[in-house]
């Protein structure tokens, strides 16, 4: 991972992050039911259109952005009008489909962990679903544990599973 730089997105890079995120998740349209994809892609688009208080972290390989994630600190909203977060969470971890398997996703999660620790938080959370099996495996390998009481089930969609990492 030493050939990469993990940093905050610059304002002029937003279009690349949107393009990258859509490309990273496009394959799941074939895996998810129509209703699940519609719900997920709508939620993804709402974050891509307006990430509110989220910090957008990117991985730059020196030529282009090859990964991104949206980090929401404690006291911010990660889901529209939902209550303020009690602890940091990240959403929409995305890695360029042509650059997977090189540690980009792990580097982004490690940066979210670093930021959560630096803020004094005792945990870092995320939500995912069974369709994202390779990401779930990475999160579990990194020490994230299921928190079923944080699950939610959007109408017509898969159960969105809560995970947390104690810091």
Image (cartoon, helix red, strand yellow):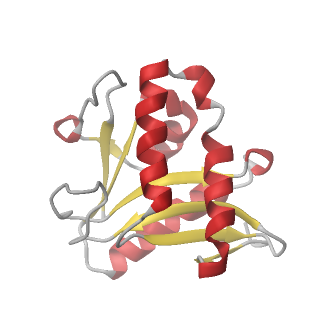
Residue for point 59% across, 80% down: 11
Q: Closest to the observer: 167 or 14?
A: 14
Which residue lies at the image location 28% right of the left edge and 56% below the top edge?
A: 80
Relative vertical location of residue 58 with respect to residue 7 in this rendering, above or below: above
In the picture, residue 124 is in which quadrant?
bottom left
The residue located at (82%, 76%) in the rendering is 62
* Quadrant showing the C terminus: bottom left
Left/right placement of residue 123 relative to residue 111 reads left
Residue 149 quadrant = top left
Residue at the outermost top position: 33
Q: Is residue 16 visible?
A: yes
Foreground residue among 84 and 124: 84
Q: Is residue 18 left or right of residue 155?
A: right
Q: Residue furthest right?
A: 63
Q: Looking at the figure, which quarter contains the N terminus?
A: bottom right
In this view, the residue in front, 144 or 98, is 98
Relative to residue 158, is residue 151 depicted above or below?
below
Residue at figure coordinates x 65%, y 60% from the top left: 67
Image location of residue 6, percent across then percent down = 63, 74
Question: Where 33 falls versus 101 (above or below)?
Answer: above
Res 10 seen here: no
Q: Where's residue 54, x and y in %?
A: 39, 70
Q: Position of residue 151 (x, y in %)?
A: 24, 36
Q: State the count of labels.
A: 0
Q: Is residue 162 left or right of residue 46?
A: left
Residue 109 image position (x, y, % from top left) = 50, 60
């Amino acid at each position: 991972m030493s050939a990469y730089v993990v940093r905050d997105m610059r304002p002029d890079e937003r279009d690349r992050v949107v393009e990258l995120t859509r490309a990273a998740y496009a394959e799941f349209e074939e895996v998810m039911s129509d209703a699940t994809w519609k719900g997920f892609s709508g939620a993804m688009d709402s974050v891509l259109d307006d990430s509110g208080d989220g910090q957008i972290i990117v991985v730059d390989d020196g030529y282009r952005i090859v990964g991104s994630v949206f980090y929401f600190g404690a006291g911010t909203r990660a889901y529209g009008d939902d209550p303020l977060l009690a602890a940091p969470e990240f959403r929409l971890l995305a890695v360029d489909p042509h650059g997977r398997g090189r540690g980009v996703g792990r580097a982004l999660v490690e940066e979210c962990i670093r930021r959560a620790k630096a803020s004094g938080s005792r945990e870092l959370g995320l939500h995912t679903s069974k369709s994202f099996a390779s990401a779930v495996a990475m999160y579990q390998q990194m020490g994230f544990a299921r928190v079923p009481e944080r699950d939610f089930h959007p109408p017509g969609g898969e159960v969105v599973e809560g995970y947390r990492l104690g810091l």
